[in-house]
Image: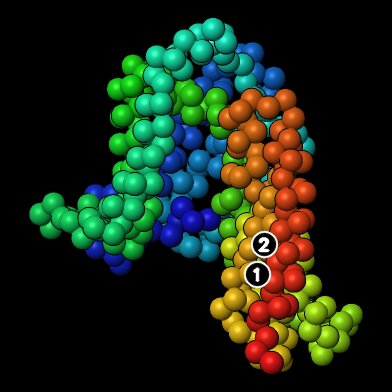
Amino acid sequence: MSAMTTTATAQPALLSIGNIYLLIGFVVLFLVIKTLQDKDHPKRLTTALFWGLFGSVFLLGDLSVTYLGESLTYRWVGVCVIAIALLAGMGKVSMGSYDVPSDEVQTASARRIGNKLFIPAVLIPVVTVVCTILLKDIQLGSLYVFDQSHVTLAALTLACTIALLVSWKFTGGSPLQALGESRRLVDSIGWAAILPQMLAMLGGVFIVANTGTAIQDLVTLFVSPDNRFMLVVIYCVGMALFTMVMGNAFAAFPVMTAGIAVPFLIQGHGASPAPLVAIGMYSGYCGTLMTPMAANFNIVPAALLNLKDKYQVIKVQIPTALSLLFINILLMYGIIFND
């Protein structure tokens, strides 16, 4: 998992990737402790175990590499991943009990804070961009502020911290209350909260396993390499379907592009690479709109909006996604070929 890829050879930094992972680990540890303390939790032990296994990689990953070596560390992390998948698959992860404010209290709070509530949300991307572009090289003595190998992630961490401080100012909340709310939100989302990281790992596995080559061989069995239109259809639809499986178009892109776009369309028919891969990514995004695997896009909003049907967002997006996918196919076929 990515929590073990620290900057061993990078210059020391205040916001190093190792420190960021430890921070994540401690937040997850808080969630585990609060879950164990929740006597009314229907699946207290297994839910705590789920998050404990997940957080252990952030807390102990680098330490394990140092003292146990990479091989043994990768083995126990793999066991943790399998155990996490089993716990989620068997329905052993559930939401705890919470005291939710009444509608009257929430309405009064919303009126008191007003549009200032959006300021912390806007601060996160603004501070991240400013720090990444303009402040990435600042130092405190001989110590860089931002990890030079992971500037954007370090800047994002600082931006979230600043947004949290501003939120406390507006709401009159406390650090403990913020952690409690983070636990409630993560608990509401459930196992889907860790899907992006797990799917990123799966994408790496597919690339190492040369899945693109296997897809290339599979396409030749059903479609003639001379049939341009069907190759475009398979590439666009394949990007959407593989994204639905992976939950992320960026994970699906190298596999589908290496298996279909490069050998058949670019090398075989001389297609223009720039519009081809751009529309290919757009086709992948159509798949993102139609899958619960894209938890950060589809499941998280449903949890934040307290929708009774957690798949409601997906159901609303499906007609738009299919329409855009059809348009992408026609657009790609119309503009990528030079003859």
Mark 1 element type: helix
Q: Which of 79 and 239 is in front in this view?
A: 239
Q: Quadrant of residue 189?
A: top right
- Residue 175's place in the image compared with 314, above or below, is above
Amino acid type, label 1: Gly
Does any portion of residue 315 appear in the rendered image? yes
**Residue 204, x across and y down, in percent:** 59, 66
Which residue lies under the disc numbered 1? Answer: 280
Q: Residue at x 47, y 10 (%)?
A: 108
Q: In which quarter of the image is residue 292?
A: top right
Q: Which of 218 and 22 is in front in this view?
A: 218
Residues packed near mark 2 inside 10 Å, few (<14), some (14 to 19) or many (20 plus): many
Q: Which residue is drawn at 50% across and 42% down?
A: 56
Q: Which residue is drawn at 59% across and 70% down?
A: 278
Find the distance from the CA under tag 2 to the CA under tag 1. Answer: 6 Å
**Residue 60, x across and y down, in percent:** 44, 47
Which residue lies under the disc numbered 2? Answer: 284
Mark 2 element type: helix
Q: Quadrant of residue 239?
A: bottom right
Give the numbered dot on residue 99. Answer: none
Does any portion of residue 23 appear in the rendered image? no
Amino acid type, label 2: Gly
Could you tell me which quadrant the C terminus lies in?
Answer: bottom right
